[in-house]
């Protein structure tokens, strides 16, 4: 075998191994990114689940603040904490138009065309601008 043939074979082998190495690096980088994305999604799911679990306590706090005048100062503190957690109430004020994406109707009265909220039975919440729990409302058709 001539020296030039051997050099050509070696160069071809080097090129092949270099290509294999580049593919392996790219595969590893894609794998690393995918694992990172999965970890981020898992973290987000845990955060949503944790915040969801405190909603009954927030409901109780709302009822207590609404019924006992001496607890009114807690409302501002609670609102501030909710803001820090990126948790906000869904607007379900009486007379507001019913939105099935934000509100869950459990009772409907009347027979008109327009659906408005007659009463909020349980507040709903956004968490990081996504609906965490829709507001449970009584709807009136006018």
Image (cartoon, rainbow, N blue to C red):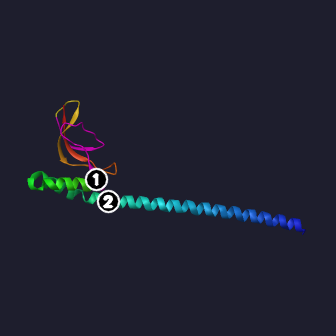
The picture places residue 111, in percent across and down from the top left corner, at: 18, 31
Decide if residue 136 is on the left or right side of residue 130: left
The picture places residue 139, in percent across and down from the top left corner, at: 19, 39
Identified at 76% across, 65% down, the residue is: 13
Quadrant (top left, top right, bottom left, bottom right) of the C terminus: top left
Dot 1 surroundings within 10 Å: few (below 14), some, or many (20 or more)? some
Identified at 38% across, 58% down, the residue is: 44
In magenta, the rendered stretch is: 83-109
User: Which residue ends up furthest to the right in the rendered image?
Assistant: 2
Give the secondary structure at mark 2: helix
The picture places residue 91, in percent across and down from the top left corner, at: 24, 43
Dot label at residue 49? 2
Tally the numbered discs: 2
Front residue of 32/133: it is 32
Q: Earlier in the sequence, mark 2 or mark 1?
A: 2
The picture places residue 93, in percent across and down from the top left corner, at: 20, 41
Q: Is residue 14 magenta?
A: no
Dot 2 surroundings within 10 Å: few (below 14), some, or many (20 or more)? few
User: In the figure, 86 relative to 96: above or below?
Assistant: below
Q: Nearer the viewer, mark 2 or mark 1?
A: 1
Q: CA distance from mark 2 to mark 1?
A: 18 Å
Decide if residue 19 is on the left or right side of residue 108: right
Give the secondary structure at mark 1: helix
Residue where numbered disc 1 is placed: 83
Front residue of 41/66: it is 66
């Amino acid at each position: 075998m001539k020296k030039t043939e051997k050099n050509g074979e070696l160069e071809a082998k080097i090129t092949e191994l270099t290509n294999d190495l580049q593919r392996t690096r790219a595969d590893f980088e894609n794998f690393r990114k995918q694992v990172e994305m999965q970890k981020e999604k898992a973290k987000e799911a845990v955060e949503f689940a944790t915040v969801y679990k405190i909603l009954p306590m927030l409901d109780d706090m709302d009822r207590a603040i609404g019924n006992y005048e001496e607890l009114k100062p807690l409302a501002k503190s609670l609102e501030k904490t909710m803001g820090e957690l990126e948790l906000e109430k869904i607007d379900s004020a009486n007379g507001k138009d019913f939105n099935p994406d934000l509100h869950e109707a459990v009772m409907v009265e009347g027979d008109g065309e327009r659906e408005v909220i007659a009463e909020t039975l349980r507040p709903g919440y956004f968490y990081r601008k996504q609906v965490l729990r829709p507001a449970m409302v009584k709807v009136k058709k006018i």
